[in-house]
């Protein structure tokens, strides 16, 4: 049976982003009357599946990662919708309060300067609409609790490492393309040896 949270998930790609932000805040705050009124405005909208692509690094990434460290989440991805809008997709632990996690990540993005945070939060068994499946297929991993090494969230640092690893003049043996792809797509630091040589 759909919950208020999953009903809002189903409206991603249909309802205006700004209204979804307000509705999710109301849900997290327990404002049931306000939430019901907003849902009544949104339920006639027809979802669409936009074009998604991997997202380039952004200054807001560090704020999101910092917030995730204090939340019951297992992974976070970010995708670029219609070549313009970043969408953060957050997978929680099984017992997490999904509306509360949504509101926390929204607030982190707003504090970092994102005027309309697009945050989609789901649990390990949450049925996902086509919108979210398409976004995940294109998304870049931003944070995961299974990665032992640090993720590169600073834009300049990540670009410096990419430039270093892609420079064949640094070493007689060029860095493996897999390392470049992993850093570029997943933002995780490669093996310590090459990193210790970068300056």
Image (cartoon, grey):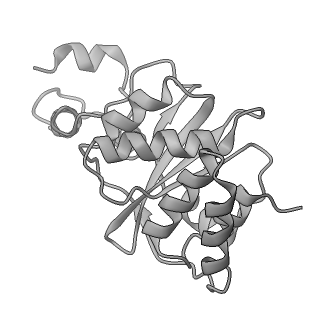
Residue at point 33%, 47% (across, down): 110
Number of numbered callouts drawn? 0
Q: Residue furthest toward the right? A: 1
Left/right of residue 127 with respect to residue 171 in the rendered view: right
Is 25 in front, or is 178?
Answer: 25
Quadrant where the N terminus is found in the figure:
bottom right
Q: Which quadrant holds residue 120?
A: bottom right
Residue at point 30%, 57% (across, down): 115
Residue at point 53%, 51% (across, down): 25
Is 191 in front, or is 135?
Answer: 135
Quadrant where the C terminus is found in the figure:
top left
Left/right of residue 28 with respect to residue 113 in the rendered view: right
Q: Position of residue 4 (x, y in %)?
A: 73, 59
Residue 179 visible at all: no
Q: Which quadrant holds residue 33?
A: bottom right
Is 22 in front, or is 123?
Answer: 22
Q: Is residue 62 above or below residue 27?
A: above
Q: Position of residue 127 (x, y in %)?
A: 78, 58
Residue at point 63%, 52% (across, down): 31
Q: Which quadrant holds residue 155?
A: top left
Is 194 in front, or is 80?
Answer: 80
Residue 107 visible at all: yes
Q: Position of residue 148 (x, y in %)?
A: 50, 18
Q: Position of residue 137 (x, y in %)?
A: 57, 60
């Amino acid at each position: 049976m759909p919950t208020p949270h999953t009903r809002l998930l189903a409206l991603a790609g249909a309802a205006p982003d700004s209204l979804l932000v307000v509705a999710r805040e109301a849900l997290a705050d327990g404002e049931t009357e306000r939430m019901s009124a907003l849902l009544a405005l949104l339920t006639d909208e027809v979802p669409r599946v936009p074009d998604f692509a991997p997202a380039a690094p952004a200054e807001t990434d560090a704020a999101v990662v910092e917030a995730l460290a204090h939340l019951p989440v297992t992974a976070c991805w970010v995708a670029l919708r219609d070549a313009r809008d970043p969408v953060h997709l957050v997978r929680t632990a099984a017992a997490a309060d999904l509306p509360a996690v949504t509101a926390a990540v929204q607030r982190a993005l707003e504090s970092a300067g994102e005027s309309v945070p697009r945050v989609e939060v789901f649990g390990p068994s949450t049925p996902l609409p086509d919108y979210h499946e398409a976004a995940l297929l294109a998304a870049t991993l931003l944070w995961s609790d299974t990665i032992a090494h640090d993720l590169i969230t600073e834009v300049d640092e990540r670009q410096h490492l990419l430039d270093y690893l892609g420079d064949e003049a640094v070493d007689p043996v060029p860095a493996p393309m897999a390392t470049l792809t992993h850093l570029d797509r997943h933002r995780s630091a490669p093996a310590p040896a090459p990193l210790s040589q970068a300056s």
